[in-house]
Amino acid sequence: MKKDDITIIKMAFVNAFLVKVKEGFVLIDTGLAIHWEKLESELMSAGCLPDKLKLVLITHGDFDHTGNCAKLQEKYKSKIAMHKEDSFMVEQGVFLKRKVRTLAAKIFFILRKLKRRKFTFDKFKPDIFITDGQNLKEYGFNATIVHIPGHTKGSIGIITDDGILFAGDTFTNMRKPDIATYIENSGQLKNSIARLKKMNIKTIYPGHGKPFEMESIARQI
């Protein structure tokens, strides 16, 4: 896969990724509901909607990654795929309580709670439940799903055949490459990262911040 095949759709502090695949596109995450116009504009500019979006992959159930799923289902009949362990979050509108690793993240978390109304999203039911090791070639995407719980129970990564990892919030790069700042289960996160280190990952596309090379963080984790 060429880097030109990946469009980073930056919506405030969160990324969505539009990936050009065989005969269409795959969208990874959807951003906040308040940025629907931005997302739709980017998709249409790429020639994606309504008939070329083959799948929407959700890395985990947080509202800043799932905010536009309901609109995509309703307006464009898009198929939304995610891990079953996080489905309750989007079906019931649940926001998980988690440990916060850094002071900056704690401040952001408090501010986000104060502005919760602004960050609402429409509940929805996923169309497809994806599983660890699932191949995505049927969607024209040479990539595989890896289940990497820790940030949430249902967190997944998407690893392309040539070593690109779409990591959701398992990794971040707001100031520098780092592991998740919000953690539901520390033990699971540690195991997930140990597993990823054994895989042929070259470049990481995080849900927050810029892409970075795996080697830049491999020694820290």
Image (spheres, rainbow, N blue to C red):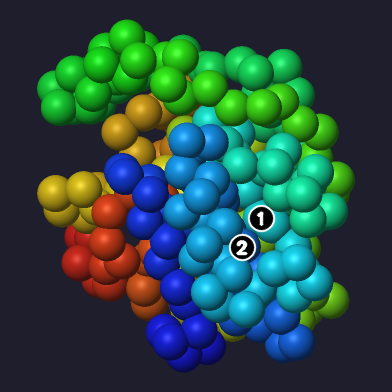
Residue 57: image tag:
1
Q: Which of 64 and 49 is in front in this view?
A: 49
Q: Which of marks 2 and 1 is in front?
A: 2
Residue shown at 31% from the left, 66% from the top:
211
Q: Position of residue 38 (x, y in %)?
A: 46, 54
**In what element is the residue under mark 1?**
strand
Q: Residues within 10 Å of mark 2 (few under 14, many from 20)?
A: many
Q: Position of residue 11 (x, y in %)?
A: 38, 49
Q: What residue type is labelled 2?
A: Leu
**In what element is the residue under mark 2?**
strand
Q: Gap in Å between the C-alphas at discs 2 and 1? A: 6 Å
Q: Nearer the viewer, residue 61 or 187?
A: 61
Q: Where is residue 126 in the image (x, y as percent from the top left)?
A: 80, 40
Q: Where is residue 32 in the image (x, y as percent from the top left)?
A: 48, 38
Q: Residues within 10 Å of mark 1 (few under 14, many from 20)?
A: many
**Residue assigned mark 2:** 27
97 left or right of 146 in image: left
Whether residue 195 is visible here, answered yes or no, is: no
Q: Disc 2, disc 1: CB below 8 Å?
A: yes
Residue shown at 71% from the left, 49% from the top:
72
Question: Reading the chain from its start, which is encountered first: label 2 or label 1?
Answer: 2
Residue shown at 47% from the left, 77% from the top:
6
Please, is residue 123 above or below residue 148 in the view? above
117 left or right of 71 in image: left
